[in-house]
Image: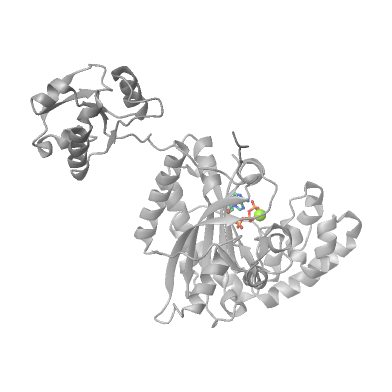
Amino acid sequence: MSEKLAAVKGMNDILPPESARWEWLEEKVRALMRRYGYANVRTPVVEPTALFVRGLGEVTDIVEKEMYSFEDTMNGDRLTLRPEATAGIVRAMIEHNALYNGPLRVWSNVALFRHERPQKGRYRQFHQIDVEALGHAGPDVDAEQILMCAALLRDLGIDREHVRLELNSLGQPAERNAHRAALVAHFEAHADRLDDDARRRLHSNPLRILDSKNPAMQPIVEAAPKLLDFLGPASLAHLDAVRAALDAAGQPYRINPRLVRGMDYYNLTVFEWITDKLGAQGTVCGGGRYDGLFEQLGGKPTPAVGWGMGMERMLLLLDAVGANPPPEAPDAYAIVPAPDAMTTALVACEALRAAGVSVQMHAAGADGWGGMKAQFRRADASGARYALIFGADELANGQVAVKHLRDGSGAQRLEPLADPLAWAATLQSGH
Ligand code: ATP
Ligand code: MG
């Protein structure tokens, strides 16, 4: 036997029955997007490295140490597995002049790659639902996006007590520069207490120090000057309008003046949905406004706002609060005692499926066809409500036996094979 191969560290296989939870979540998301009028987009997994360096900022965790970058050995191009979704979507919008006819609201379901230390809720390949409203200056759209996330949490059965909304404003570049000078002065005064990361960023990107996850740094981070105190009237009015909309919609939030996001492209509104149930990986959803990104990537000035929700973390949270989807099972499992009845069974199952019944058909395993007992065991394991028994005696009369597997009665009835539409519906849930 050859040596076994394993998946790359920090990258997960998603197999049944876990995959059913993913599909359930994805269906809730799809329904949400339809309700809010967001259209699906799909962009490549690989992008030019320069897109992320320019888009996210050179002095960010992602660009400095988390990107999977490589050289295309065919032509020497520098490429990167996308670590986030927004830059690629904005690139696509600019490249195709997609906002020519006006603003667009889009969403995407993406696999992302970051070279982080794998732990619960933090992986090297992970997945996000990403939502972007392109071409709207807000603040109404900022509020819409926050409320969208609230609606999704509601649809998933997650109570308000389990996730809180934190909100902040990063203002505009000029306000950030004034704040930045004050920050540098503050951190310089405490230079002896900065860690290596912070010391390196002191002059290149001091705002990032506020995002430090180092507990030893928290006291001086807490004491740092607040960006909110540097905002001018227009920025404050934008924040107030977002707050007023959330208040009107009955959505609670907390202003967190320390909330900064991992990418440099954000301005004005930023927000996170945070849970206490997942330890240090408590942010399930994060987003904000990024009015400067289109220009930074060579496009026309275009206001935009978006958020990303971590699928793995959302599924962990759902587990933690016991908000799990109903188990998935076929309506029926077709038991075929003898191989020579297979073709008849197969044709009957096709007719039932065409009528909307989900049927899992018995098939031979590596150990042969399988006796009745083994087939009933598999029928039971499949979760199917009914067994369809294609036995020789029944088939000789043009019939199939239908046995209820879940009501404890063991009741069995006969149905005509020639007319599956007459009884197909009785196999479906609700009957
Ligand atoms: P964190 O602060 O936890 O590192 P982040 O600020 O880097 O998160 P974003 O880039 O804003 O996260 O991505 C949005 C969401 O994607 C996060 O809130 C989280 O749910 C999820 N996420 C981010 N990184 C990972 C990862 N390595 N593994 C799993 N999910 C992740
Ligand atoms: Mg991160």
Examine the rendered structure and indicate whether residue 46 appears above or below residue 427.
Answer: below
Rendered residue at 73%/51% (across/down): 213
Left-right relation of 177 to 420: right
Examine the rendered structure and indicate whether residue 429 appears above or below residue 132.
Answer: above
Examine the rendered structure and indicate whether residue 155 appears above or below residue 186.
Answer: above
Rendered residue at 70%/71% (across/down): 230
Left-right relation of 184 to 150: right
* Residue 275 in the image, given as x and y percentages of width and height: 58, 44
In the rendered image, which quarter contains the N terminus?
top right
Q: Nearer the viewer, residue 262 or 78?
A: 78
Residue 114 picture quarter: bottom right
| Whether residue 245 is visible | no
* Residue 17 in the image, given as x and y percentages of width and height: 44, 36
Left-right relation of 61 to 109: right
In the rendered image, which quarter contains the C terminus?
top left
Left-right relation of 329 to 48: left
